Image: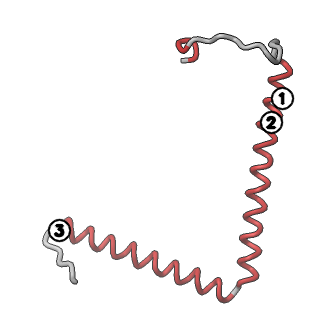
């Protein structure tokens, strides 16, 4: 099934789409070739990415926990007390 462009806009769109599909296909083929050629190197890169991401998440969790702990200590409320707040005060 062939697509025949009838207007200038559809011609530009089809040319743009064809270019993007060609670029995406070449990138995927290139990544596949790199994986076949250098499996150990790419495994190290992916492992490094995972370690950096995991470390970043641990740091973010620590900052949230530490901030909550400091806020809880400086709070004048007891553990069982709650403050009534209306919706208008929150906004």
Mark 3–mark 1 CB contact (< 8 Å): no
Residue 47 pos. (x, y %) = 76, 69
Q: Residue most toward the front?
A: 80
Mark 2–mark 1 CB contact (< 8 Å): yes
In the structure shown, which secondary structural element does the residue marked by tag 3 occupy? helix
Local packing at callout 2 (Cα closer than 10 Å; few below 14, some 14-19, many 20+) is: few
Q: Residue at x 79, y 49 (%)?
A: 58
Residue receiving disc 3: 8
Local packing at callout 3 (Cα closer than 10 Å; few below 14, some 14-19, many 20+) is: few
Horizontally, is 24 left or right of 11 in the view? right
Mark 2–mark 3 CB contact (< 8 Å): no
Residue 36 pos. (x, y %) = 65, 88
In the structure shown, which secondary structural element does the residue marked by tag 2 occupy? helix
Horizontally, is 25 left or right of 36 in the view? left
Of discs 2 and 3, which sits in the foreground?
2
In the structure shown, which secondary structural element does the residue marked by tag 1 occupy? helix
Q: Residue most toward the left?
A: 6
Residue receiving disc 1: 69
Q: Which mark is residue 65?
A: 2
User: In the depicted view, which residue is nearer to us: 69 or 21?
Assistant: 69
């Amino acid at each position: 099934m062939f697509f025949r462009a009838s207007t200038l806009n559809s011609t530009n769109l089809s040319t743009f789409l064809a270019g993007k599909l060609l670029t995406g296909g070449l990138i995927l083929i290139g990544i596949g070739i790199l994986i076949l050629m250098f499996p150990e190197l790419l495994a190290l890169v992916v492992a490094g990415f995972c370690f950096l991401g995991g470390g970043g998440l641990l740091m973010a969790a620590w900052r949230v926990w530490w901030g909550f702990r400091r806020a809880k200590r400086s709070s004048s409320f007891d553990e069982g007390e709650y403050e009534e707040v209306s919706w208008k005060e929150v906004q």
